Image (tube, rainbow, N blue to C red):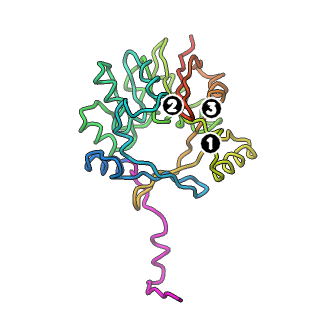
Amino acid sequence: MTIQADVAPGLLEQVDQPRVGDAFGELVTRCWAAGARPGSVFEVLERADGAVFATDTSHWFSGPAQWNGAETWACEQARGRILDIGCGPGRHALALTEAGHHVLGLDSSPGAVAVAEERGLSVVLGELGEAEALGAFDTLLLLGNNLGFLGSRESSPAVLAQLAALARPGSQLLASTRDMRNSQVPETLAYRARNRALGRLPGEYRVRIRSRATATPWFEYLYASVDEVRELVRDSPWALCDSHQEGTAVAVRLELRG
């Protein structure tokens, strides 16, 4: 059977790419409006090889009882003045604030910042490179797999230096990531093998977040094992002091040298 469609010339070419925008902010805004109800909104992470991964957006609103053990362990180490980098709608910032900590959130998503503010949190809209005006902190958080902001072996020294510029003497950096070495997904195994062949770390991903017809710009994101984190920080202002792993979930504690 042949199906014919009456489509105006050029129409398909006009709609074959998503609009670039605050896709993450759209997702958390819709989920918040739905009461952060599980199953109400799904986030799609698209990798550069075409693989897509869907997750329930409500996890960005989960409380400590729903966190993995690595992130629970990381939050238990938090102290002093805290900067939650890439805070999203504030799941970690909210729990730490309610526990009596002084927490400031930082995120580049206008939608996520608006939701975090609605939840009563103190949040700044901006990028990591713009954060020095916020002063110095005792604890920096990169949770929700946000160690991924290191991006790659090549970009990590600059990011680690930016983080050190926000830290007081004796400060710590608490970060979480995923150790994907034991993945059994054929596409992920192939992607990691291609990275190795190109001289990259296996967990260097190029991804974007999708929300309906909106997508973030493509960005580099790193998934690393504890040994790879140790390699990345070796010549940085930071020293790896402790780690906690449960399954693929990894959290690390770095201390500012000197």
Q: Position of residue 30 (x, y in %)?
A: 30, 51
Residue in the image at 47% along x and 15% along y: 171
**Which one is closest to the eye, mark 2 or mark 1?**
2
Question: Can you say whether 193 is above or below 84 in the image?
Answer: below
10 Å neighbourhood of mark 2: few (<14), some, or many (≥20)? many
Instruction: Left or right? Give the position of 195 relative to 120.
Output: right
Instruction: Left or right? Give the position of 90 relative to 168.
Output: left
Q: Sequence order check: which comes first, mark 3 or mark 1?
A: 1
Give the CA distance from mark 2 to mark 3: 10 Å
Residues tagged 2 and 3 counted as in contact (Cβ below 8 A) = no
Q: Position of residue 90 (x, y in %)?
A: 34, 35
Q: Position of residue 69 (x, y in %)?
A: 47, 28
10 Å neighbourhood of mark 1: few (<14), some, or many (≥20)? many
Give the secondary structure at mark 3. Answer: loop
Q: Quadrant of residue 247?
A: top right
Residue in the image at 56% along x and 10% along y: 258
Q: Quadrant of residue 133?
A: top left
**Residue position marked by numbered label 3 in the rendering:** 225
Q: Sequence order check: which comes first, mark 2 or mark 3?
A: 2
**Residue position marked by numbered label 2 in the rendering:** 176
Q: Position of residue 28 (x, y in %)?
A: 34, 46
Name the amino acid type tagged 3: Ser
Tag count: 3
Give the secondary structure at mark 1. Answer: strand
Residue in the image at 50% along x and 36% along y: 145
**Residue position marked by numbered label 1 in the rendering:** 204
**Which one is closest to the eye, mark 3 or mark 1?**
3
Give the CA distance from mark 2 to mark 1: 15 Å
Give the CA distance from mark 3 to mark 1: 12 Å
